[in-house]
């Protein structure tokens, strides 16, 4: 517990919210924030997985608190706040400079690779 990982990105036009190819706002989208939160949480877990284990996301909650325009740098920090024999829970915060722009929580379940493979095959 307490392990942290950080992802830093510069907001690009590809990270803006777009629907049917039309950019709605020239700012960092919530789905880009979600992607970077997932990535930071994965980086918390990955170094601790054993060879026969894999993690799979089971929950992500986000509060997108403030916009970040194209060209700004966003830093996403995931910190492990709870671990048990099956789950890793990360608290995640996003910043543009010192400004807090997002917060959330992500849960990953740790499974044997064979179990995960069987689950995926069952749903194909």
Image (cartoon, rainbow, N blue to C red):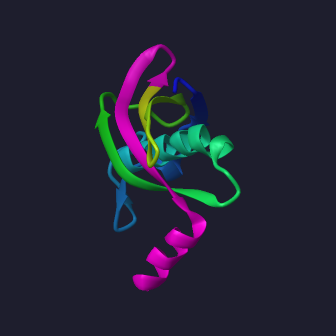
* Residue in front for this viewpoint, 3 or 78: 3
Residue 88 locus on image (x, y percent): 46, 41
* Residue in front for this viewpoint, 97 or 79: 79
Which residue lies most toward the front here? 85
* Residue in front for this viewpoint, 25 or 28: 28
Residue 33 locus on image (x, y percent): 43, 42
Q: Is residue 61 left or right of residue 46?
A: left
117 relative to 35, above or below: below
Quarter of the image for residue 63 reads top left
Q: Identify the magenta region.
A: 95-124
Give the number of callouts.
0
Residue 96 locus on image (x, y percent): 48, 23
**Residue drawn at the location 37% of the way across and 30% of the way down:** 102
**Residue drawn at the location 52% of the way across and 52% of the way down:** 14
Residue 112 locus on image (x, y percent): 56, 62
| Magenta stretch: includes residue 120 | yes
Quarter of the image for residue 104 reads top left
Quadrant (top left, top right, bottom left, bottom right) of the C terminus:
bottom left
Q: Is residue 49 left or right of residue 120?
A: right
**Residue drawn at the location 59% of the way across and 31% of the way down:** 6
93 relative to 28, above or below: above
123 relative to 29, above or below: below
| Magenta stretch: includes residue 12 | no
* Residue in front for this viewpoint, 87 or 15: 87
Which residue lies most toward the right here? 51
**Residue drawn at the location 38% of the way across and 26% of the way down:** 101
């Amino acid at each position: 517990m307490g392990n942290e990982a950080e992802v830093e990105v510069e907001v690009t036009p590809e990270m803006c919210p777009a629907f049917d190819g039309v950019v709605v706002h020239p700012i960092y989208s919530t789905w880009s924030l979600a992607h970077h939160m997932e990535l930071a949480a994965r980086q918390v877990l990955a170094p601790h997985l054993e060879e026969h284990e894999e993690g799979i996301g089971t929950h992500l909650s986000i509060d997108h608190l403030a916009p970040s325009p194209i060209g700004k740098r966003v830093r996403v920090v995931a910190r492990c706040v709870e671990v048990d024999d099956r789950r890793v829970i990360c608290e995640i915060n996003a910043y543009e400079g010192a400004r807090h722009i997002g917060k959330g929580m992500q849960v990953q379940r740790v499974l044997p690779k064979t179990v995960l493979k069987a689950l995926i095959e069952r749903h194909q």
